[in-house]
Image: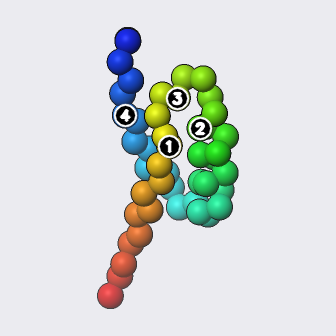
Amino acid sequence: PDKPVQVILITHRAREADVKQSLREIAPLDFIAGDTQLIRIERFTG
């Protein structure tokens, strides 16, 4: 319980602006120990 852990969330299809807004709301919470990051996952069909 004394050490931070990484949490990875993969959401359903969502607008990037909405995801970024969520990260802005999550980042200042007192239990967040590090920087929040967004890694975009795209599906390419061909």
The x and y percentages for residue 37 are 47, 49
Residue 36 is labelled as 1
Q: Amino acid at mark 1?
A: Thr
**Residue where numbered disc 4 is placed:** 6
Q: How is the image coloured?
A: rainbow
**Residue where numbered disc 3 is placed:** 32
Say few, some or many: other residues with alpha carbon within 10 Å of mark 4 (under 14 / 14 to 19 / 20 or more). few
Q: CA distance from mark 2 to mark 3?
A: 6 Å
Q: CA distance from mark 3 to mark 1?
A: 8 Å
The x and y percentages for residue 11 are 49, 51
Earlier residue among tags 1 and 4: 4
Q: Is residue 17 above or below residue 9?
A: below
Say few, some or many: other residues with alpha carbon within 10 Å of mark 1 (under 14 / 14 to 19 / 20 or more). some
Q: CA distance from mark 4 to mark 3?
A: 10 Å
Q: Are marks 2 and 3 in contact (CB under 8 Å)?
A: yes
In the picture, which quadrant includes the C terminus?
bottom left
Element marked by disc 3: loop
Q: Residue furthest toward the left?
A: 46
Q: CA distance from mark 4 to mark 2?
A: 14 Å
User: Does residue 45 appear to the left or right of 38 in the view shown?
Assistant: left
Element marked by disc 1: loop
Q: Are marks 2 and 1 in contact (CB under 8 Å)?
A: yes
